[in-house]
Amino acid sequence: MFDKLEKVLMPLAEAIGNNKYLVSIRDGFLISTPLLIAGSIFLVIANLPIPGFSDWVASIPIADGTLATYLSKPSDATFSIMAIFATFGIAYSYARQIESDSLFCAAAALMAWFLIMPYTVTGSVDVGGEAVDVALSGIPLGWVGAKGIFVGIFSAFGATAIYTWVKNRGWVIKMPAGVPPTVTESFSSLIPITVTMTIFFVINVVFGLFGTNVFDIVFTFLQTPLLGLGDTLGAMIVAYLFLHAFWFFGINGGSVVGAVFNPILQTLAAENLEFFKTGIGEGHIICQQFQDLFATFGGCGSTLSLLIAMILFCKSARIKQLSRLAFIPGVFNINEPIVFGLPIVMNPVIIIPFVLVPTLNIIISYFAMDWGIVPICSGVQIPWTMPLGISGLLATNWVGGVLQILLLIMGVFIYLPFIKTIDNQYLRDEQLAAEQAANEPDEDDIDLDDLSFDDL
């Protein structure tokens, strides 16, 4: 059975892992990760889960605002314009994949994305006590934030492909020898960028003739349905079943599945943050923080529970030594030592709890949030290395931290009978090895009966 499953999963993993588009999306989002985490630090400070703290911060005047206003600026400079970082990063990564001019392709992608964006900001103003709708010229924060990510992805791939296609045909301005390289590169990119701009200009005009724009169409007919599909318990469970199936065969399931699923989760998280800040839109249970902080503890398979079971209940020297070495990394959600050291890879005994524990974590956490027992995640970016308890507190409140601890304990007892089976096997192997070593003669001892002079 395992051979048949491997034959199905291995080609799929290789296809996804070698797909330039999915790899570019995955790596492109990584550019924004440190920016979002840094912005989250200020957002957490402004919203510490201490009664009355937020009101106190909002009451401290600074210049033309308050301390709360200024503490919100770092998150506005990261979360509110995250689509800009994503578009630039994806185009840059894709250009490197196809061996093109990464920096110029990223710049062309941003230009193309802004070119097809509607420059209209709508709102209302109070005129004589009556709200009047107005439309002003400007760049809407909604489109440069979470709502504009999918158009940014298409712009990144489209602009990079057009730029590269033009340049590969030699349609460039060539400068004479002796001109500085930076000047040469700039002029050689002029025609490819002009062609890219012209194509996206035509796209913008065509949509404008129909009274709409690319952003509205993509958000209405693609992004909204995809986010709705990703924001379901079933989608999360299916994604994690595949993720752990890949890990069982030694393939990094997080990279394979995350290339497809993470952009949806990150967009949902950004919408959560906007919802908590402004009350606009709706919150989502399933999001990036839900996956990172409530699905697994200690890494894939929620192996921190496994490590605790190993430390408390196992007796074999091999497992005791491994658990001591792997525990500290496991606290910070790094579990390669346990995945490959136990091993979990290709181990049919441990695969059952390895899949079951994260699945139960997801189901229990989902309904705890759906029933209002635990608040949904606020969208604040918590580093994935943050230990449990603290991460749950920062993402929701103290109830979220308690839920993490209870799920961790549940996982210990689910893993226990399986790891004890492996432990007993290792104990027998160690005892057998000890007996064989005791029966073997010491190499330092000389037995005169074994000496022979026949070959002299």
Image (cartoon, rainbow, N blue to C red):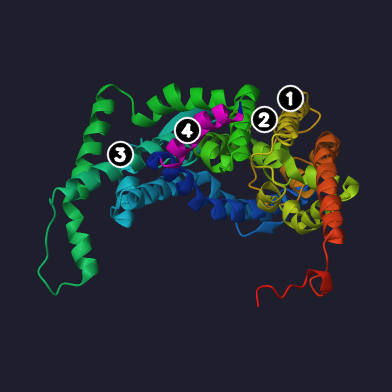
Left or right placement of residue 3 versus residue 11 in this view: right
Q: Is residue 287 visible?
A: no
Q: Earlier in the sequence, mark 2 or mark 3?
A: 3
Mark 1: which secondary structure?
helix
Q: Measure how far apart labels 1 and 2 are at the Cα level.
A: 7 Å
Q: Earlier in the sequence, mark 2 or mark 4?
A: 4
Q: Earlier in the sequence, mark 4 or mark 1?
A: 4
Nearer the observer, 132 or 127: 132
Which quadrant of the figure has residue 393? top right
Q: Measure how far apart labels 2 and 4 are at the Cα level.
A: 29 Å
Q: Residues within 10 Å of mark 4 (few under 14, many from 20)?
A: some
Circles 1, 2 touching at the beta carbon (< 8 Å): yes
Numbered circle sitting on residue 12: 4
> Residue 295: x and y, percent?
70, 36
User: What residue is pinned by disc 2?
Assistant: 285
Q: Residues within 10 Å of mark 3 (few under 14, many from 20)?
A: many
Tell which residue pokes out farthest to the left in this image.
Answer: 176
Q: Measure how far apart labels 2 and 3 are at the Cα level.
A: 32 Å
* Amino acid at circle 3: Gly
Q: Earlier in the sequence, mark 4 or mark 3?
A: 4
Could you tell me which quadrant the C terminus lies in? bottom right
Magenta stretch bounds: 2-18
Numbered circle sitting on residue 158: 3
Report the residue at 60% width, 56% height from top: 38
* Amino acid at circle 1: Asp
Circles 2, 3 touching at the beta carbon (< 8 Å): no
User: What residue is pinned by disc 1?
Assistant: 370
* Amino acid at circle 2: Ile
Nearer the observer, 440 or 84: 440
Secondary structure mostly seen in magenta is helix
Which quadrant of the figure has residue 291? top right
